[in-house]
């Protein structure tokens, strides 16, 4: 059931004609307005749905999310804002709630106006069809260049009751989040105060969706939303403690699973890699180095070819803008120690090559500057990525 697995949520997906074919509009609704929170892109070129949804979620409550694929409604100026508000108003009338209780999210081509006649018709078709059985269809309908839907369910104990988290996401390109991913939606039937729900989301995203990169491009539309119906009947989470920790940990688990799915489905990707930095002065330094290495086109193309060219890793970490002594750095490809004290060491080239052919390629950088660590997930850069993005609008 994916995002509709938690009690108190229904969804519907329809083909509104926004994309050339297939499902492209989703309504995800709670049975009643409930606590909600979101994090959004840090890109300054923010899409209209981001601006409007941020306003609506200032109350900490929402009733439903309307998502369309095929048009990002970004770079559309005042008309884009008006169209987003009109979407919320139309959905609110159909659901019998206030427009401010509607979250709107869009994904697709930038600089194109929403076809509002199709959006309205799609909402009119989706709302009467809402049901718990449509969670998987919803996960499929939000895809653009994704090759497969991304969804997960996590169960946990909270406040003396059994609760669950359902989630779905889309994303394969323009992925270098600095808050979340392209689009991610979480639901839970746990009862939780809005302030703590937002805190849990921020913490979960920081250890999952904020630690992935496909191509180094942060989207105009990045949005991660969580809604909590409270239908599990648990004692509400109202402060720090074991119940809050259980909620946050379950949310983090769901977000990490989605994050890995996104990177493994990266546009044209054939390899998944974890880059781990150890021995940094601060966690921020470690994260910075990991991200620069992960985004390096030379490192990513070497990954694609299975080429243990560790010099590209050394060059990337050296330009990360983090003060360090290169003569104290070591580099490992899997378990193969390829560079010591910033210089080549004797190693088995065949074993190093095999390390880059594993289901998860592990690159480890040891700095010798301190005790802080950081990590990021990335993928290779292939001909397929270029082909997809050279013809994205055609």
Image (cartoon, grey):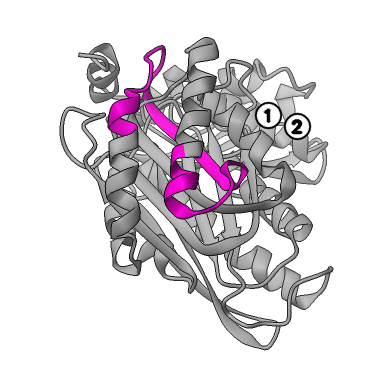
Mark 1 Cα-neighbour bin, 10 Å: few <14, some 14–19, many ≥20: many
CB within 8 Å, label 2 to label 1: yes
> Is-magenta flag for residue 180?
no
**Quarter occupied by the N terminus:** bottom left
In the picture shown, does residue 239 fall above or below 376?
Answer: below
Q: Nearer the viewer, residue 379 or 85?
A: 85
Find disc 2 in the rendering and name its residue.
Answer: 285
In the picture shown, does residue 86 fall above or below 248?
Answer: above
Q: Residue at x 31, y 45 (%)?
A: 124
Which residue appears farthest toward the left when viewing the image?
A: 21
**Quarter occupied by the C terminus:** top left
The stretch in magenta equals 90-119
Corner quadrant of residue 379: top left
Q: Nearer the viewer, residue 26 or 108?
A: 26
Element on which disc 1 rests? helix
Corner quadrant of residue 197: bottom right
* Residue 267 percent coordinates (x, y): 31, 30
* 139 left or right of 169 in image: left
Residue 288 numbered tag: 1
Q: Nearer the viewer, residue 11 or 82?
A: 82
* 29 left or right of 200 in image: left
* Residue 63 percent coordinates (x, y): 55, 55
Q: Residue at x 49, y 18 (%)?
A: 80
Estimate the spatial distance between the alpha carbons at disc 2 and disc 1, rounded to whole Å: 5 Å
Q: In the rendered picture of this protein, how many numbered marks are placed on residues?
A: 2
Q: Nearer the viewer, residue 12 or 328?
A: 12
Residue 136 numbered tag: none
């Amino acid at each position: 059931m994916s995002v509709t697995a938690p009690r108190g949520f229904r969804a519907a997906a329809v083909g509104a004609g926004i994309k050339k074919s297939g499902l492209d509009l989703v309504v995800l609704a709670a049975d009643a307005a409930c606590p909600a929170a979101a994090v959004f892109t840090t890109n300054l070129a923010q899409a209209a749905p981001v601006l409007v949804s941020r306003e609506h979620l200032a109350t900490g409550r929402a009733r439903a999310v309307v998502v369309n694929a095929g048009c990002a409604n970004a770079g559309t100026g005042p008309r884009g804002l008006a169209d987003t508000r009109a979407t919320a108003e139309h959905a609110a009338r159909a659901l019998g709630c206030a427009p401010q209780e509607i979250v709107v999210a869009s994904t697709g081509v930038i600089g194109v106006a929403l076809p509002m006649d199709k959006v309205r018709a799609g909402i009119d078709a989706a709302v009467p069809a809402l049901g718990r059985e449509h969670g998987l269809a919803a996960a499929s309908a939000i895809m653009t260049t994704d090759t497969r839907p991304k969804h997960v369910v996590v169960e946990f104990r909270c406040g003396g009751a059994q609760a669950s988290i359902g989630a779905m996401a889309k994303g394969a390109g323009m992925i270098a989040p600095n808050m979340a991913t392209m689009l991610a939606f979480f639901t839970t039937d746990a009862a939780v105060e809005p302030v703590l729900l937002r805190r849990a989301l921020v913490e979960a995203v920081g250890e999952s969706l904020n630690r992935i990169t496909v191509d180094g491009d942060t989207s105009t539309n990045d949005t991660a939303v969580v809604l909590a119906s409270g239908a599990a009947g648990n004692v509400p989470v109202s402060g720090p403690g074991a119940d809050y920790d259980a909620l946050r940990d379950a949310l983090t688990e769901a977000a990490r699973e989605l994050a890995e799915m996104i990177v493994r489905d990266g546009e044209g990707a054939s390899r998944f890699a974890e880059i781990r930095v150890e021995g940094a002065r601060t966690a921020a330094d470690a994260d910075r180095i990991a991200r620069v290495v992960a985004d390096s086109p030379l490192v990513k193309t070497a990954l694609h070819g299975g080429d243990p060219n560790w010099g590209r890793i050394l060059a990337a970490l050296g330009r990360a803008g983090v003060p360090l002594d290169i003569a104290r750095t070591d580099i490992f490809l899997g378990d193969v120690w390829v560079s010591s004290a910033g210089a080549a060491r004797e190693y088995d080239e065949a074993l190093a090559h095999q390390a880059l052919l594993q289901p998860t390629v592990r690159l480890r950088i040891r700095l010798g500057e301190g005790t802080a660590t950081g990590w990021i997930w990335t993928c290779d850069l292939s001909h397929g990525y270029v082909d997809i993005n050279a013809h994205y609008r055609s």
